[in-house]
Amino acid sequence: MEVNAQFNDPRLEKLDGFTVTINSESQRANITLNRPPYNVVSMVERDQLRLVFEALDEDESIRIIVVSGEGEHFSSGGHIKGFLESSPEHVSKLAWNIAAPARCSKPVIAANRGYCFGVGFELSLACDFRIVTETTRYALPEQKLGQIPGSGGSARLQKMVGVTRTKNIVMRSKRITGQQAYDWGIASEIVSNDDLEKAVDDLVAELLTFSPLAQRTAKKLLNDTDDALLSTAIELEGHCYSRLRSSEDFKEGVTAFHEKREPKFTGK
């Protein structure tokens, strides 16, 4: 059963431009950008999204978080006037807020349909999985405003696709299709527009079959070693492997394998 999420933080008493629902049966939280038709993201919304991710990360009943947009588009980007109205100190926090999905210990899926521009693209890049359709259009159009991406977009993108393609997207404000995003390794999966929700449901179901402890460990390891030397990454991988070796989930996984049954992981 899906219900509206309740938060103790008074700053989340009234959500600005998005909704949060929780499905206890599927251990899933849904963050839906909800300012149609283009789901423009306000400055207040950026702050609240960070707080929501932090709250959902602490909720032990939730295993997976899905971020999507209401209607035909994920998001056309941020509220432009908000940049001029905000203080330099507030603007300096933009990247930290939008990086919340990456800091979250749980798997985060972005369901990207239609426009996915500016902060919409940057928020998606901070997620672990991006599922796109033939309608998806990714872009970082800040050059048209005399600006550059300010919430981690160019930095994350360069890690994924290299400097040449990133310059083409950032310096020319060039849009790329869902197919290009998949071919370049930005998107995890491409499906038909009508199948987006089913693809997300299937991925959630698949991720729930794994050990939550192993999932959290894998995500943190991969994030922490993104800039590391190969030798350092291998060393850290070994330490993580050793720690999981003593977990109850690993024991259950090995036992289930030999007993030819599905494992029942508890996250311990």
Image (cartoon, rainbow, N blue to C red):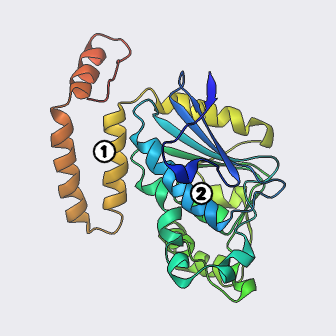
Could you tell which of marks 2 and 1 lies nearer the N-terminus? Answer: 2
Q: Is residue 106 visible?
A: no
Q: Is residue 84 above or below residue 71?
A: below
Q: What percent of the width, then of the height, locates residue 238? A: 18, 49
Residue that badge 1 annotates: 217
Q: What element carries label 1?
A: helix
Query: Nearest the camera: 165 or 88?
Result: 88
Q: Nearer the viewer, residue 31 or 250?
A: 31
Which residue, given by chain and number where applicable, does mark 2 sit on?
124
Residue 138 visible in the current orientation: yes
Q: Residue furthest bottom?
A: 146
Residue at screen point 63% across, 55% down: 182
Q: Name which residue lies at 80% across and 58% down.
A: 38
User: Dot 2: within a 10 Å radius of its alpha carbon, few (fewer than 14), some, or many (20 or more) residues?
Assistant: many
Q: Position of residue 97 (x, y in %)?
A: 51, 64
- Identify the element where label 2 is drawn: helix
- Residue type of the residue flagged with mark 2: Ser
Query: Is residue 69 positioned above or below 263 on the image?
Result: below
Q: How many marks?
A: 2
Q: Quadrant of the C terminus?
A: top left
Q: Position of residue 140 (x, y in %)?
A: 67, 73
Instruction: Give the camera-side residue of 19 and 267.
Output: 19
The kind of residue tagged 1 is Thr
Q: Which of 47 and 123 is in front in this view?
A: 47
Q: In which quarter of the image is residue 43?
A: bottom right
Image quadrant of residue 57? top left
Q: Which residue is drawn at 36% across and 64% down?
A: 226
Q: Residue 231 carries which label?
A: none
Q: Please indicate whether residue 209 sits to the left or right of residue 179 in the image.
A: left
Residue 32 in the image, given as x and y percentages of width and height: 67, 45
Above or below for 90 versus 265: below
In which quarter of the view is residue 213 placed?
top left
